[in-house]
Image: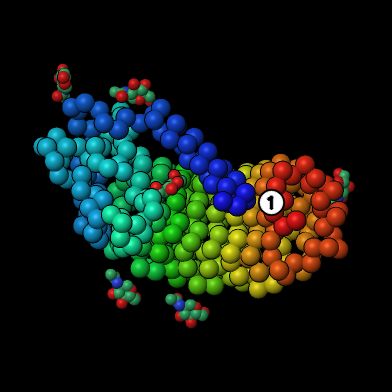
Amino acid sequence: MELGKWLKHAYAISIVVLLHINASLSLGHHHANVTRCVKRERDALLAIQRDLVDDYNRLSSWGSGSEAQKEDCCRWDGVYCDNQTGHVLRLDLGVDDPWWKDGESTFSGLQGTISPQLIQLHQLTYLNLSCNYFNMSQIPAFIGSLTNLRYLDLSQGGFGGQIPSHALGNLTHLTYLDLSYNDFNGSQIPAFIGSLTNLRYLDLSQGGFGGQIPSHALGNLTHLTYLDLSYNNFHGSQIPAFIGSLTSLRYLDLSWASFGGQIPSHALGNLTHLQYLNLRNEELHYFSEFPLLVENLSWLPHLSSL
Ligand SMILES: *[C@@H]1O[C@H](CO)[C@@H](O)[C@H](O)[C@H]1NC(C)=O
Ligand SMILES: *[C@@H]1O[C@H](CO)[C@@H](O)[C@H](O)[C@H]1NC(C)=O
Ligand SMILES: *[C@@H]1O[C@H](CO)[C@@H](O)[C@H](O)[C@H]1NC(C)=O
Ligand SMILES: *[C@@H]1O[C@H](CO)[C@@H](O)[C@H](O)[C@H]1NC(C)=O
Ligand SMILES: *[C@@H]1O[C@H](CO)[C@@H](O)[C@H](O)[C@H]1NC(C)=O
Ligand SMILES: *[C@@H]1O[C@H](CO)[C@@H](O)[C@H](O)[C@H]1NC(C)=O
Ligand SMILES: *[C@@H]1O[C@H](CO)[C@@H](O)[C@H](O)[C@H]1NC(C)=O
Ligand SMILES: *[C@@H]1O[C@H](CO)[C@@H](O)[C@H](O)[C@H]1NC(C)=O
Ligand SMILES: *[C@@H]1O[C@H](CO)[C@@H](O)[C@H](O)[C@H]1NC(C)=O
């Protein structure tokens, strides 16, 4: 695997591992005989299941099995509850490698629609719908009322159209947002992302984004350690100088995003915590300013465009 790709994966995995360590400290998954599930949330999960197309029985543990298992939604696959209150804290419907199942190249992720009953899970801190296929529908606006969310992974979800900005701007506790590998049809990166000032991790790669980047907004994300804008089409606009104010960045990928013009090396020179930088792109004019940039970032272990 290409080193850059590997680093990216290693970084993503370390974040996910941390997440799971955190989760296993505070969440009990299978706990003995005690039914902890909150009835209203159980009903909501069953409604969510009804609206999904689940050809590969990923949710077969939901509402089936022994009496205790049927009743206690906290024992269902992908559902993690608070062990004190029984509220659902994490819903993990992300699929690993959805294209291959039993050696066939059929799609084995979930399809269908996301039930508005999802909002009954109002204590959710983690929602993962990654690698399913929601038929290029919009991200549902009601996700915006899950204001306790810290982690939202909608990557490769088959989402499309416009992002409901007014709604998702309420998710101010988010530290992790992944909208990569969807098709937002050339729309701008929505400015509301700039109000999510707790974000550490932001992946908008291959999202079908276009137009101008709302720099005034994104410059507020000073806690970001990971930013990936690669594989979008910013129509030859310059790499925005606001990147220079994201001084916590450790990982920055701006490759193949159709940036043009000069690299704002003055701005990038501020990113003294960078460990990974990818500027690979045919259109950029490296050679006038690059030496200067490289001088200040010379400790970078991996500078992908050299
Ligand atoms: C519930 O979680 C707490 C930590 O948040 C842990 O100390 C405790 O042992 C857990 N209780 C049960 C019954 O799993
Ligand atoms: C769970 O099981 C333990 C022992 O197996 C028993 O003492 C306890 O009463 C049970 N709790 C419930 C709620 O059934
Ligand atoms: C979401 O689920 C996918 C598939 O299991 C996994 O690769 C990804 O790391 C998960 N995202 C987060 C934030 O945990
Ligand atoms: C997916 O979207 C297309 C076009 O909007 C529509 O014709 C089709 O019925 C949808 N399929 C499902 C399963 O919802
Ligand atoms: C977002 O927050 C505003 C103000 O608190 C509220 O009026 C609005 O209904 C919220 N939007 C959603 C989708 O929850
Ligand atoms: C995508 O954008 C184009 C141009 O703005 C528009 O004509 C088309 O209807 C959009 N498609 C969808 C699915 O929103
Ligand atoms: C970004 O910060 C500026 C100044 O602090 C503020 O005026 C602006 O509203 C913020 N933008 C967003 C999208 O939150
Ligand atoms: C980079 O740092 C210098 C000096 O600390 C500062 O004047 C400049 O505004 C910063 N550039 C950006 C784009 O934040
Ligand atoms: C490199 O760093 C020096 C000293 O910190 C600074 O004066 C200069 O502007 C930086 N150059 C670039 C291209 O960022």
Nearest the viewer among 207 and 10 is: 10
* Residue furthest out toward the front: 103
Q: Classify 10 Å Cα crowding around label 1: few (below 14), some (14-19), many (20 and above).
A: many
Total number of numbered labels?
Answer: 1
Residue positioned 61% across, 70% down in the render: 233
Q: Is residue 247 left or right of residue 83?
A: right
Mark 1 = which residue? 277
The location of residue 145, given as percent across then percent down, is 39, 52
Tell me the SS state at disc 1: strand
Residue 116 appearing in the image: no
- Give the image quarter of residue 124: top left
The location of residue 190, given as percent across then percent down, is 55, 63
The location of residue 192, given as percent across then percent down, is 55, 58
Residue positioned 63% across, 65% down in the render: 257
Q: In this view, does 254 lie to the left or right of 33?
A: right
- Give the image quarter of residue 61: top left
* Residue type (three-letter) at the residue carrying disc 1: Leu
Residue 63 appearing in the image: yes
Residue positioned 33% across, 33% down in the render: 82
The location of residue 293, given as percent across then percent down, is 82, 53
Q: Is residue 14 left or right of residue 21?
A: right
